[in-house]
Image (tube, rainbow, N blue to C red):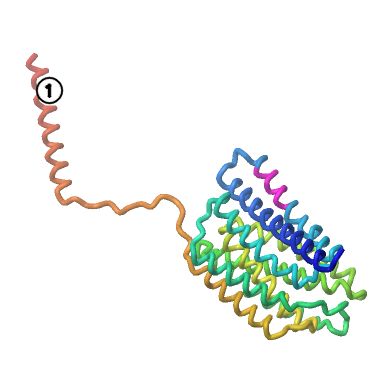
């Protein structure tokens, strides 16, 4: 099989993998909304949530095919996540019935451009070495970033979860980024066992925060924020703590992604429920009501008088 055909097949399977991943996320969101609005269908919603979780989990296995079997370069597969984002936007509109405004579409496109720029020049740095691992920078970065994000989540909660989709999505993406970095560190023999357990802990936390974000906001805001944080933090902390390459075009991609997130979240979330209009006060209403009351009272008195006479 020719090398070009390998790449084409790898790209096609990569597209399928990302579509499955983001449809799975959309189904999870759909199930969570069902738990909140239709409590009589818990069994159905639970089944849907499990199905969505299976789809998202299957992504890691499907992605092995283009990378390991067809030997498609990782910097060709990674930008295909943009197609997954587009899939989710479409899913959110048609299935979740979430409104998608033009500015959100523009923001998503800008994010996709940034994702492509970051990944198009990415290359493997070989096996990770213990000498390359700066543990102090790694753990301090984790504590500082988590501290800032949890503070923002608390502020969001105190303000009726304003911008919850962006903030919690960023936190879930940060957890995914550190999960990726920890997986990278598992290549170091001296750290393999410890970081295997840490990786599973990050994976569990990522799933929990992702579901929390879906419960509080639209998927069309959660997932782009999640993806942005995952890519940006992986690139920056990978450079600082693992001495991985970070070239100028990737830095430009990071800036573009941040701009895309700002554009995406520029649309305020509409309040749910019935809009109550303020009552219009009619100055003649009181006098009319009083007049009608007097007429009814007089009518009652006449009626009672007639009954007595009879």
Asked whether 59 or 292 is in front, the reply is: 59
Q: Quadrant of the N terminus?
A: bottom right
Q: Residue at x 69, y 77 (%)?
A: 118
Q: Could you tell me what secondary structure mostly forms the magenta stretch?
A: helix
Residue 136 appears in which quarter of the rendering? bottom right
In percent of width and height, residue 236 lies at 71, 80
Residue 131 appears in which quarter of the rendering? bottom right
Q: Residue at x 67, y 58 (%)?
A: 22
Q: Residue furthest top?
A: 310
In percent of width and height, residue 301 lies at 11, 27
Tell me the magenta residue range: 45-53
Asked whether 48 or 99 is in front, the reply is: 99
Q: Quadrant of the C terminus?
A: top left
- Direction from residue 222 to residue 101 in the image, left or right: left
- Direction from residue 97 to residue 3 in the image, left or right: right
Please say whether residue 50 is one of the residues in the magenta stretch.
yes
Say which residue label 1 marks. Answer: 304
Asked whether 253 or 226 is in front, the reply is: 253
Please say whether residue 132 is one of the residues in the magenta stretch.
no
- Direction from residue 292 to residue 201 in the image, left or right: right
Q: Residue furthest right?
A: 189
Q: Residue at x 72, y 67 (%)?
A: 176
In percent of width and height, residue 142 lies at 72, 75
Q: Residue at x 66, y 71 (%)?
A: 229
Q: Counting other residues with Cα less than 10 Å from the Cα at mark 1, is it few (<14), some (14-19), or many (20 or more)?
A: few
């Amino acid at each position: 099989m020719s090398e070009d055909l390998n790449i084409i097949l790898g790209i096609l399977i990569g597209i399928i993998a990302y579509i499955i991943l983001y449809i799975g996320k959309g189904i999870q969101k759909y199930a969570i909304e069902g738990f909140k609005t239709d409590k009589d269908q818990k069994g159905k919603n639970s089944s849907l949530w499990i199905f969505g979780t299976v789809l998202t989990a299957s992504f890691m296995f499907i992605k092995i095919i283009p990378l390991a079997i067809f030997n498609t370069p990782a910097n060709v597969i990674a930008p295909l996540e943009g197609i997954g984002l587009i899939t989710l936007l479409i899913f959110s509109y048609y299935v979740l019935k979430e409104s998608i405004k033009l500015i959100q579409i523009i923001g998503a496109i800008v994010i996709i451009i940034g994702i492509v720029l970051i990944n198009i020049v990415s290359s493997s740095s070989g096996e990770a070495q213990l000498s390359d691992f700066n543990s102090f920078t790694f753990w301090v970065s984790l504590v500082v970033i988590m501290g800032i994000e949890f503070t923002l989540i608390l502020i969001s909660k105190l303000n009726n979860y304003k911008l919850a989709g962006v903030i919690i999505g960023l936190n879930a993406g940060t957890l995914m980024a550190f999960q990726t970095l920890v997986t990278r560190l598992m290549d170091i023999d001296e750290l393999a066992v410890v970081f295997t357990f840490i990786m599973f802990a990050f994976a569990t936390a990522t799933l929990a925060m992702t579901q929390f974000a879906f419960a509080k906001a639209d998927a069309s805001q959660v997932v782009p924020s999640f993806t942005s944080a995952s890519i940006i933090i992986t690139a920056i902390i990978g450079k600082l703590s693992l001495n991985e390459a970070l070239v100028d075009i990737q830095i430009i991609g990071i800036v573009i992604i941040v701009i895309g997130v700002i554009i995406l979240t520029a649309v305020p979330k509409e309040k749910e429920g019935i809009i109550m209009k303020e009552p219009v006060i009619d100055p003649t209403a009181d006098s009319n009501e009083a007049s009608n009351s007097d007429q009814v009272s007089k009518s009652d008195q006449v009626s009672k008088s007639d009954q007595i006479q009879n």
